Image (tube, grey):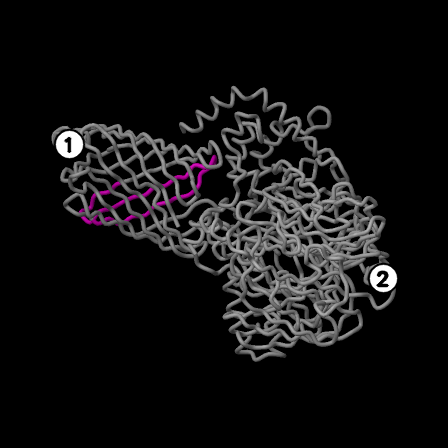
Amino acid sequence: MIGKVATILLAVVALPVQAQTMADSQTDHGAHQATHDEPAVPQGATPPVPTDHAAEAFYDSAVMARARAAMLKESGGIAFSQLMVDRLEYHAQKGGDGYRWKGEGWIGGDINRLMIKSEGEGEIGNTLESAELQALYGRAIDPWWNIVGGIRQDFRPQPQRTYATIGIEGLAPYWFEVEGQIFLSDSGDAHLRLEADYDQRITQQLILQPAVEVNFAAQDVPELGIGSGLSDFELGVRLRYEIAHEFAPYLGINWERKLGDTARYARAADEPVSATSLVAGVRFWF
Amino acid sequence: MDSLTLDRRSLLRGAATLTLAHAFPAWARSGTAGLQSGPEVLSGDLIALTVEENHFGTAGRSTHAVTINGTVPAPLIRLKEGQTVRLAVTNRLREDTSIHWHGLIVPFQMDGVPGVSFPGIRPGETFTYEFPIRQSGTYWYHSHSGMQEAMGHYGPIVIDPAGADPVRFDREHIIVLSDWSNVHPHMLLKRLKQMGGYYNLQKQTLAGLLEGKDQSLKDRIEWGKMRMDPTDISDVTGSTYSFLINGHGMSENWTGIFQPGERVRLRIINASAMTNFNVRLPGLSMTVVQSDGQHVQPVETDEFQIGIAETYDVLVQPTEAKSYGLIAEAIDRSGSVRGSLAPRIGMAAPVPDLRQRPLLTMKDMGMDMAGMDMGQNGVIDLSQPANERMTGHSMKMLDPSVAPNVPMGPGVATLSATPSDRAADRPTGLEDVDHRVLTYADLRALEPNQDVRPPTRSLDIHLTANMERYMWSFDGLKLSDGAEPIPFRHMERVRVTLINDTMMPHPIHLHGHFFQLVTGEDAAHNPRKHTVNVLPGGKISFDLTADALGDWAFHCHMLMHMHSGMMRVVTVRHGGEMT
């Protein structure tokens, strides 16, 4: 969102120059073809698909079958993988600096994939505050969206929780990366997490990424300090420099805020309700 | 492989200090006088080829290559129309290999596609191909196994006509164009699957917008709404590729010798894995005399686009004793290679600046603007009517009703709503250049086509994709999805229309046949081709006489598109057997 607003503001300044460029770049559409006046070719009847393999008249059928299986697999059936640590970062903030990580990996084909996701945070010199790991099955359902489902295990905070999860992730119009997951814990509490980010390419290597995360809970979970309703949100903007696509250090600002009962739980525990951090980190993948 | 990619720069520095012994066949050596008979030209009735792994380096970068008889490119095979040839291919790799004779009319069991025409050649084995030579012209050969073709496994074939050659020339050179990366092709494909635009370092940026470059903000927002990138011209680019002429990079300046006034025949073959080129010789007019090995009526031009696997023979007549540049520019302008035609070696022609990277238009997205509101001065106002239409029912970017036979799914991101026949269009990026540019409609067969029966059946094939997921297919199905073969009856005449639902040109190759591109009314002179480059968002038709019994491969010649599933088996059977 921030990226888009900034784009619009900046572009207004640049508009007169744009008009000139537009006129220059569009002179190529003068030559339109007249539609051909050809006699229509009949649709005709498609012959049946043969069930034999012609090469088996010359080569051993078992040998051909093996070669055919290999050829089919190499024509779209190969599996790939990726491990992406999207954020590994230091948080400089009032009341104690901290660290965070967030990443995911997948292995599989174009449609079906096994995935892991992990995120967590802690305070420097103190205990790990939160750590979650998800094991998911992901399936592409249309050109832009995947559904994911699986299990999330929270190792911190205590008490540990296990959640079943189902969600959707993908690329929304205007190139927004969007993700939403519902979590249902082994204690019966339900949660919703929504995330979105956007890559604004400033140059080929310098990329500004605004990101937002919002959490909802269906009920109070006092032992985890979560109140029902909109429990917290987080806004961040990170400026990364892609030394390679696979390796990009970044700087940014992150602001988070607890709301409603969640904020009340925090105040009661003498914890801050909001925090603003300067972040420095690295994104890498392979 | 990961570390290879991550450490590429340091590797490059290291490699630059090595002295590389280049082994080139005579015709490919810089300073060659052209094609001559000699011990290095493979001719005759029995030819031995050995496929093995070697090192190959260019521009200070060296890595593993798959070579034939020790060289990249592979040796020239020069044959005579009417002869029968036996080619004994020995595999010294640790994996299977194969050779496909691209454009040669051979019995299907000799066509060299593992899993379709034969089992492939196992490590340590020798397989002997044998077939009669029934044609003449410029062709090439390459591996159809794994991604060996991207690692150097390609070479030229010249077949001399049995009778007089209708093309008069004083000297001939072979020009094999290719792309070369020291990153293994499997890693290139992996990166594309991880990030579809990985190799595109010419995307639109905010800095560009501020400088007034590229699309206006309004167009950027409209294209962003569709999740379409107008800079998506090529998948693998000059960001990792060196482009080669006869195995020589830019700095190595491959040079072919001529004497002023000579008519020089250039047999140009695009043996790239992933690169379509624009080819020109600044200061020289080219006369195109052959395409895909088939004679065409001579036509003059200043520049042409050569899709992967296509061949063009052109005549040039340099009159001055100076060096003329032979420029092959990747169509996304991410890089180029310059060779020289010169009276002697050591004269390097100037290297023209890379021209501006083109931007795709709505026409490239299959939304032909013909008949739509025109702006002033004959210029289409892209920003106004198009956007309204786009959101309306007539101009959806994914309207399943325009392709009822294509199943919708993750692999089909767009369908061309109103694809136009682009046979007469200048190819991508050459729309605006201020000199002559060859189009398919300029090609007319020299020898009339033998079969000019009107087609009795029509067949549409959609070229489908999802760039973000890096999925490529025909009719929405990858071959690995269990797609059925495309059946033909022996000797039936079929009008095949290829509809490009993607924003990238696709060089589509049918094995075992020449088809006739439908470029005009005169069926006798429509050009015969084995590979046709279908322009983005458009369509092109060809008439096919299914005269070659057997099973044949049919695929996009972008190697990674084929490997992603943009391939089919085509079957040709007797009508009697069909019932």
Query: Can you give x and y, in whole percent of width and height, for residue B96 in the image?
Result: 53, 70
The answer to whether residue B310 of the structure is visible from this angle is no
Q: Are marks 1 and 2 on the same chain?
A: no
- Residue A95, compared with residue A102, is above or below; it is above
Rendered-image quadrant of the N terminus of chain A: top left
> Is A57 on the left-hand or right-hand side of B33?
left
Q: Nearer the viewer, residue B25 or A241?
A: B25
Q: Which residues are magenta?
A: A162-191
The image quarter in which residue A212 lies: top left
Is residue A164 part of the magenta span, yes or no?
Answer: yes
Amino acid under label 1? Tyr
* Residue at position x 67%, y 31% in the image: A26
Residue A53 appears in which quarter of the rendering?
A: bottom right
Seen in the image, is B306 located left or right of residue A105? right
Kind of element beneath mark 1: helix
Callout 1 crowding tier (Cα within 10 Å): few <14, some 14–19, many ≥20? many
| Badge 2 amino acid | Asp
Give the residue number, with chain letter if any, for mark 1. Answer: A265
Q: Nearer the viewer, mark 1 or mark 2?
A: 2
User: Which secondary structure lies at badge 2?
Assistant: loop
The image quadrant of residue B334 is: top right
Residue B165 is marked as 2
Q: Which one is nearer the viewer's eye here, B448 or B49?
A: B49
Main SS, magenta residues: strand
Chain letter behind tag 2: B
The x, y position of residue B480, in whole percent, is 51, 62
* Residue B574 visible within the image: yes
* Residue B287, horizontal then vertical, whole percent: 81, 49
Q: Between B24 and A83, which is closer to the camera in this rendering?
A: B24
Q: What's the residue at 21%, 49% (across, down)?
A: A162
Distance Cα–Cα, label 1 vs label 2: 91 Å
